[in-house]
Amino acid sequence: MKTASITRRLFLLSTGAAATGLIVGCSSAATKSKGYSSIAGAFEPNSFIQITPDNQVIFYLPSSEMGQGILDGLTTLIAEELRVDPTAIDVRHASLHSDYKNPELRFQGTGGSNATRTQFLPLRQAAADTAAAIRNAAAKQLNQPAHKLLLADGHVTAEGRRYAFGEFVALAALMPMPENSPLRGPAQFDQIGRERPRLDALAKSTGIAVFGIDAEVENLYRAVVVRSPVLGAPLKRFDATAALKQPGVVDVVEIRTGVAIVAQSYWQARKAASALELDWEKTELASWSSDSIYQKFTQTLNDSSQKGLKCCDEGEGDKLLNQAQHVVSADYYAPYLAHATMEPLNCTVAVDGDNCAVYLGTQYVEASAGAVVYYGDFDADKVKVHPAFLGGGFGRRGLGDDVAEAVVIAKKTGRNIQLVWSREDDMSNDFYRPAALVRMQAGVSEQGLIETWAVRRVGPNVLDHILDQWVDVLAPDYLNKGFVDWLSKLGRPLFKRFIADPSSADGIFSDYDMPNKAVRHVAQDPGLRTGLWRSVGHSSNAFFKESFIDELAQRAGIDELQFRLANMKNNPRLTEATELVAAKAGWGKALPGGHFHGLATHSSFGSAVAQIAEVSVEGTKIVVHKVTAAIHCGLVVNPGIVRDAVEGGIIFGLTAALHGEITLVDGVIQQSNFHSYPMLRMADAPKVEVHIVESQEHPEGVGEPGLPPLAPAVANAVFKASGQRLRDLPLRLT
Amino acid sequence: MINFQLNNTSVQVDIDPDTPLLWVVRDHFKLKGSKFGCGMGLCGACTMHVNGEAVRTCTLPIAAVQGAAIISIEGLGTPDNLHPLQQAWVEHSVPQCGYCQSGQLMSASALLQKNPNPTDDDIDVAMNGNICRCGTYSKIKSAIKSGAEVMRTQESIVETFDPASGKSIVKEASS
């Protein structure tokens, strides 16, 4: 093991970002500003790469590393074109800068499983141009023709002599910067496609990787917030007399979401919190419980006067439904879910006069910075975000609510503070995966082809809550705050009355050849805030679609694999994945006694995934023995990480399928910690086998697509094992 | 005043006696490798060794560790001197988000101290208190097995660490 270089890299990874990775506007008149602070003598061709005279290659990672392996993936792209060993690159989390914007999201953030897809060419181009600049400088300095120089392993070789890149950075910085340098082709790849341990494995196996909660600044106090038991209810009154007498407590302040207690230590703050006396206003959410929500959804589903908004209309819509040979109708339900990232939300804020520095793990660096400006009234150019590793993201971390609390506490108390949410805070103040009740209807021909596909979905949307969160913090700061707040509230009426929130219907009418489609969504929202949960709409819609596909196949009397293949003639990627998984799992072959296979196939975030779950039933217990998966995600950067991400999605999906349910009684979330919102543990984790379809096509997403097919694959196997068609999540046998 | 051994160094701390060991180690001694996950001993992210046993330190009052020997992840090994399990963790590319892995490693290393050749069931039982939200269980299990194999073939190493820096002070081999 190359200890010295690895230790140096780890040092930078764990502490360097906080020390250096943050600047706002260091531009001189001559050069465009870069996303990092300048290092004397270094070659700084773009915001991603710095090469120092002593041959240190630094890469500023524009995406957040939350477990999905993007640190490894994007560093590999740089290494490939720059001709440097990826383990020798110092990787730092990029702070806020326009050069780091997500090309699809249009702001700096990580989501939608799009980082490899969107950065595959731009980052390689940045590295290839940098390598070309080194080559040109070396040619001039060594007086050699450029094409005779060999670049490899961070060195230039000329006439048998090796020179470190660093020897040419001074000249490279003075020469014209090459553009559109040719990229290496797949036949030349020696980093892309190679399997090796992920680059952050060592830091994360030794406790030195720095997460948001590990931030330390001078004179740091710890804060906790007591919030309403009914999410979002305003504070009526509070009495801090007793809390202020508790040891270590220095401040008690009211903030927008409740009351913050600031103490010398976390434990002191947490203990003092129970001494607070609080009264809360009653809100509409307090009138809802899970039972009444389900009843209301059912009533709406059956109320044909509520037409709903159009998500999809193709062919004859649902007009021909009843003319089909087989007409099937079934209602399905998926509950609210919490994210339960292992690292509870936290945010550390250091205020120095007009300057504000925030330390946290965040998927959305720009929203986190915006929250400091919007809620803390700081000038945008005085705000520094110090991103850290994320102890899980899954769509939860960095929405701005963490920063909004922390920055106001710091400002009101005039102290540097670390706000730490308890597990209970985290679970009861989430942006939940929305619940949904759907009616699936289809007409299938005598030959087993789907003719009509009709869906009526009832439930809350995602985007209106997220827009409320994001418009505030992402809007330009020259806009009037009242106007921005008004604007941010428009999502709800917009997605209730005018256009369907596309994320609500994501994946519910895709993948198969269905000539006639009618998909409607009736927005019905009790007011529990909802958000982006790993794979978003696909997380529940794949369960509805793929369970129902099995029902159709069974009604038509056709094998579930053959039924799918016959109905996905226009979906070559999913077909390849499906055929591969069937071959690998041995679909149709004999299984151990009492074991049954269930199949599900689903495309999301550009990738196609097919899964076969091997399941047995013991009384009312569902035992998942093995899950075989195949993914078609285009060209693979690191196959190990693709397999990990798919397996991770399967385990995450199985926790949800077997256990996941957030319930309310009078508006109060009933789950608080891992005893009432259980996670799959090692003994219950099935054996997972992931196969990758060979492909040279452009890379697609892998962080999320492994999740959606899991629940229906299990449910489809449970049906065969028990005869019970489970149409509600989580799956419970009776 | 509570006295105990932290990563083989004598330390003392004057703090509210009901403060959980986790917060003492993280915020007083500034060793940040052990993580806060649930505060109820349900997830295992905070696991350390207390007199050789894997213990959930988010619910262990500091008063209860008077005179005890505590090992945190910083005392298990360092990047320059990895414990065989940490080496296996890297080779198997175990971590995803990584937040739970310190606790996983402490539970696994406590298991191997008692049972150098665990079966799958032994591993399932010993690791039952540690949640991984990213789903790295199968790799954890493989890494435990290969780490155990390495440990069975090499002598045990005892190390002493400065708890403030996490750096090795003394290194000696014992039989």
Image (cartoon, rainbow, N blue to C red):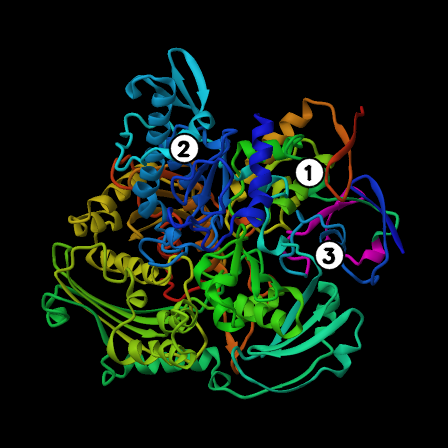
Q: Which residue is mark 2?
A: A79
Cα distance, mark 2 to mark 1?
35 Å
Report the front residue among A366 and A517: A366
Q: Which mark is residue B23?
A: 3
Question: Which dot marks residue A15?
Answer: none
Q: List x then y, in percent, for residue B86.
A: 62, 35
Give whichever of A243, A388 is nearer the camera. A388
- Give the extent of the magenta segment: B40-64
Q: Chain of mark 2?
A: A
Residue A104 horizontal side relative to residue A198, left or right: left
- The span from disc 3 to disc 1 (Cα, nearest Å) is 22 Å
Looking at the image, do the residues carrying marks 3 and 1 touch, with CB atoms under 8 Å apart?
no
Image coords of residue B156 (percent x, y): 74, 27
Q: Is residue A250 above or below residue A176?
A: below
Q: Which residue is mark 1?
A: B109
The image position of residue A626, as x and y in percent, is: 44, 44
